Image (tube, rainbow, N blue to C red):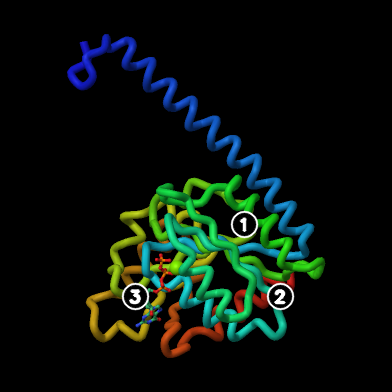
Amino acid sequence: MCDTCGCQLHEHHQHDTKVVEVNKSLLEANQKQAHSNRHHIEKMGALAINMISSPGSGKTTLLERTIEALKDTVKIGVIEGDIETERDADRIRAKGIPAVQLTTGGACHLDAPMVHGGLHVLEHFAKGEGFDLIFIENVGNLVCPSTFDLGEHRRVILLSVPEGSDKPAKYPSTFRGADLVLITKMDLLPHFDFSVEEAEIETHTLKPDVPIIELSSTTGDGFEQWIDYLKEMLKK
Ligand SMILES: Nc1nc2c(ncn2[C@@H]2O[C@H](COP(=O)(O)OP(=O)(O)OP(=O)(O)O)[C@@H](O)[C@H]2O)c(=O)[nH]1
Ligand SMILES: [Mg+2]
């Protein structure tokens, strides 16, 4: 007898097996849709970046400033993911850039089928001109988004100074999946015990060659490196 649910242990074991099977097939379906999204994005003429971080690490603020730097030369589209509200999409639209808000209604991450829907709406805004760069801002969460390929070409993880430099080792799957790590809110460094060295060592222990850029969206320090990264990516 199982102490937790009262069923026979053998049956309980079967429940576990079913849960694992359902999760596996969900992830397989997600992966299939992600491949198709990547193809779709490329047909639109674009490359896509999946932005992942804890809530409030500065994803939307970074996008606002990035748009200001690039919008005259690069055609940008944005897909925003949040549990509720259009707030982030509204902030992007205020910069004159098309933005689609996906609201997950409770889910702690975006998945490839949701992004597929978002791409069709974004395509409508492109008026046949396509895009160069599509940013997908994931739901603020340092755990769940790491499992779901959205069809992006690069995955950028943000870690802000107030969160603490011990976070990479605590959220390893997210940092292991990074193509680039941004240490954000560097202007706040004098006010927190954040060690850039610790964050970099922990990140490189998980993913040895991943580039790390330190920046501040408030002061603009470090932004040149980030913009150069995007320009290099667009050249390839
Ligand atoms: N000091 C400082 N504050 C920043 C910086 N970047 C963002 N912020 C502030 O951090 C707060 C959260 O920023 P957002 O850009 O909304 O963060 P987010 O990651 O998009 O948040 P969610 O979408 O809710 O996950 C806001 O009050 C920003 O003004 C920065 O470089 N320095
Ligand atoms: Mg945001």
Q: Quadrant of the N terminus?
A: top left
Depth check, front residue: 203 or 108: 108
Reading the image, the residue beneath label 2 is 75
Please state the horizontal and vertical placement of residue 129, each as a whole percent of the image.
80, 70
The amino acid beneath tag 3 is Val
Is ligand 2 less than 8 Å from the beta carbon at label 1? no
Residue displayed at 53% across by 63% down = 80
Circle 2 or circle 3, nearest the eye = 2
Distance from disc 1 to disc 3, alpha carbons, whole Å, reads: 28 Å
Q: Earlier in the sequence, mark 2 or mark 3?
A: 2
Distance from disc 2 to disc 1, alpha carbons, whole Å, reads: 17 Å
Q: Earlier in the sequence, mark 2 or mark 1?
A: 2
User: Residue 45, located in which quarter of the rendered image?
Assistant: bottom right
The amino acid beneath tag 1 is Glu
The local crowd at label 2, few if under 14, some if 14 to 19, many if 20 or more residues have their Cα within 10 Å, is some
Reading the image, the residue beneath label 1 is 152
Please state the horizontal and vertical placement of residue 47, each as a whole percent of the image.
69, 64
The local crowd at label 3, few if under 14, some if 14 to 19, many if 20 or more residues have their Cα within 10 Å, is some
Please state the horizontal and vertical placement of residue 69, each as a whole percent of the image.
60, 85
Please state the horizontal and vertical placement of residue 146, each as a whole percent of the image.
47, 51
Reading the image, the residue beneath label 3 is 196
Is ligand 1 less than 8 Å from the beta carbon at label 3? no
Residue displayed at 29% across by 63% down = 166
Is residue 178 shown left or right of residue 169?
right
* SS of the residue under disc 1: loop
Residue 214 appears in the figure: yes
Residue 209 appears in the figure: no
Depth check, front residue: 199 or 103: 103
